[in-house]
Image (spheres, rainbow, N blue to C red):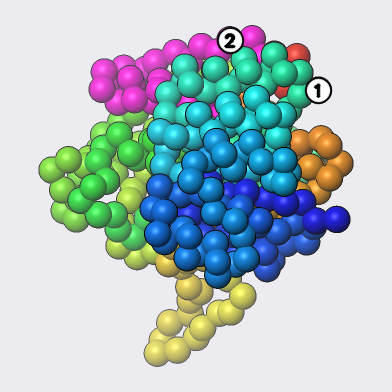
Amino acid sequence: MDLRIGVIGTGAIGQEHIQRLNHKTQGAHVVAISDINKEKATLLAKEIGAKFYETGEALIADPEVDAVVVTSWDPTHEQYVLEAIKHNKYVFCEKPLATDSEGCRRIVDAEVANGKKLVQVGFMRRYDRGYMELKEVIENRQLGEPLLLHCAHRNPTVDKNYETPMAIINTAIHEIDALRWLLQEDYVSVQVILPKQTSYTHEKLHDPQMVILETESGIHIDLEVFVNCQFGYDIKCVVVCETGEISLEDPSYTRVKAKGKDYTTVSPDWQSRFMDAYDKEFQLWIHSIQADAITGPTAWDGYVASITMVACGVARESGERVAISLDSCPALYQA
């Protein structure tokens, strides 16, 4: 029997996930939706044959809903995740898990008190083929110990609402989780450098930015965040090891030779670059619920990402290297 999924938040990413669950994955379908825009959400519910709920809490409480996907406005994430834990229901929450570290910690504490992992955070990089291949090489030590990582997260352009802190909060947060997962090490310090700016930015956005992270074993990571690069959505990760290096490539299935050039295309946006990763993420989430054992990014991962993100902000404002300090990881997340 298919899992009955409720989706809270039916904006762009919410609608993408509804289509993904109903048409791209097996073992689940959307039976319930809720959104602050009641008129549009009601029409969408009729279109897909789902039930509309006035509130996210009502959707979560309905025994006809087996599991919940939270894609609503960021400040509402914490309340809906906590409500799902209260009802002992599996919940997939797009990042951020909460808007601050204290909120993430409240979710962790609630889940620990409940005694079961119910929460998965939407860090989809872990499901990208390129990142998975990097991880395999690192874990097998095929090239010896990893020593350095050179990374970049580039967007072609952003609008005027995108401001300096968002380079970490909305953009680098994906690398913060993915690189920690690749290396299986926590971060111990961070420094943020603000280099010469592009002429394509605006007064409230320093672009690009450089984030320098150090892990527990001394691995150094430099991460360029450049959100007005103009030429495409470009994700880079080069792992330098003792006897070689392995790098992440932009997936491309065709190569063009014409007019004196030999080239492959660059992804235009995050949807096209990570579409397969999103599909795999949700399929495995469904399988983990059916097996009654969450295997994806946990509430603890969301908490660690938030602590690291805050330290990045402090480092950017101070210009100093900032220590990253974490609480002890609860036993629930060590299994």
Q: Is residue 61 magenta?
A: no
Q: Nearer the viewer, residue 141 or 151?
A: 151
**Residue denoted by label 2:** 327
Picture coordinates of residue 144, whole percent (x, y): 73, 35
Instruction: Please name the residue shown 40% across and 47% down the image.
Output: 36
Q: Residue furthest left?
A: 203
User: Marks 2 and 1, how far apart in space?
Assistant: 17 Å
Which element carries disc 1, helix, strand or loop?
loop
Q: Quadrant of the C terminus?
A: top right
For label 1, the crowd category at 10 Å Cα-Cα, with few meaning under 14, some 14 to 19 and many 20 or more, is: few
Q: Looking at numbered disc 1 in the image, what kind of residue is underneath it?
A: Ala
Instruction: Please name the residue shown 30% across and 58% down the image.
Output: 157
Q: Nearer the viewer, residue 181 or 100?
A: 100
Magenta span: 301-329
Which numbered disc covers residue 41?
none
Q: Looking at numbered disc 2 in the image, what kind of residue is underneath it?
A: Asp
- The chief SS type of the magenta part is helix
Picture coordinates of residue 264, whole percent (x, y): 51, 74
Which numbered disc covers residue 335?
1
Q: Nearer the viewer, residue 23 or 259?
A: 23
- Left or right, 193 with reference to 136: left
N-terminal of the pair, mark 2 or mark 1, is 2
